[in-house]
Amino acid sequence: MKLLKWMSTAVVMSTALQSGYTVAAPSNDNKDFSYYALVLSWSPDFCATNAKAANTTQCEIGRKYGFVLHGLWPQHEKGYPESCSNEQIPNNMKQKCDVFPTVGLCHHEWKKHGTCSGLGAAGYLDFSAQLKNSVVIPDHFKSPETTVRTSIEQFKTDFVTKNAGFSNDSIAPYCSGSGRFLKEVFFCYDKNSKPRACSAEVLHRSSKSCAQKDGFVIRNVR
């Protein structure tokens, strides 16, 4: 029933990007959060910094994964809700987990963040896929064969240029290695799927995370 409600009350709206992709804003029964953060991880950094990931499918040589979905996170202006119910992803929806790089991550993200979205499993996974696919990745960040160095300001500007509706404060990169390498990026949306500024808390953490004076490196794909 939640899926039917989501489909019937969705409003076509929001972010008309340069790609022409639009996102439907789902009806939301849970008002106990302020906005969504779509979090895309830079897969080469994940594979380089997580020893247990080295032999996973995601990190196999030749995969050439770049930005992958980490999650869609309901956010408060400070902090975030988590683990709001024990609802599981039904077996007949397992294929919807393909939006994530691994099935394990899909189930983890649904349990920790998706259960707080008020969308139900199908609605949450569909909405996650729509938002992820709506983000236009600048060409030089899609699948670099060599490392790319950039500054936090230039990184944001490159995404704003490609994605109508975003401002510099709608995008919050995070870095690993004491600020030396891109780790992941937050893209912030209101509940109607329209880009909005990330919270002051998220922006502050981002600026501290990627604070190297000479910018940060985006690792090459493998």
Image (cartoon, grey):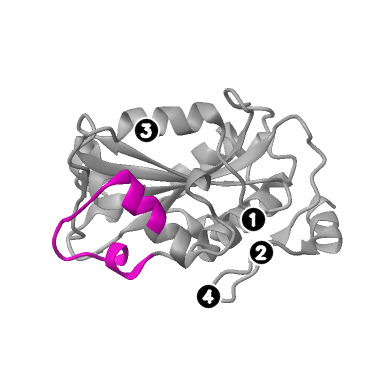
Find residue 51 and report its horizontal and vertical position in percent: 19, 36
93 or 78, which lies in front? 78
Segment tinted magenta in the rendering? 138-157
Residue beneath disc 2? 23
* Numbered disc 2: secondary structure: loop
* Numbered disc 1: secondary structure: helix
Say few, some or many: other residues with alpha carbon within 10 Å of mark 1 (under 14 / 14 to 19 / 20 or more): many
The Cα atoms of the two marked residues, 2 and 1, are separated by 8 Å
Q: Do the residues labelled 2 and 4 touch (CB within 8 Å)?
A: no
Q: Quadrant of the C terminus?
A: bottom left
Q: Which mark is residue 127?
A: 1
The Cα atoms of the two marked residues, 2 and 3, are separated by 29 Å
Mark 1: amino acid: Phe
Find residue 164 and report its horizontal and vertical position in percent: 56, 64
**Label 2 vs 3, first from the N-terminus:** 2
Q: Residue at x 28, y 44 (%)?
A: 182
**Label 1 vs 4, first from the N-terminus:** 4
* Numbered disc 4: secondary structure: loop
The Cα atoms of the two marked residues, 1 and 3, are separated by 28 Å
* Numbered disc 3: secondary structure: helix
Q: Do the residues labelled 2 and 1 touch (CB within 8 Å)?
A: yes
Q: Nearer the viewer, mark 2 or mark 4?
A: 4
Residue beneath disc 4? 19
The Cα atoms of the two marked residues, 2 and 4, are separated by 12 Å
Residue beneath disc 3? 207
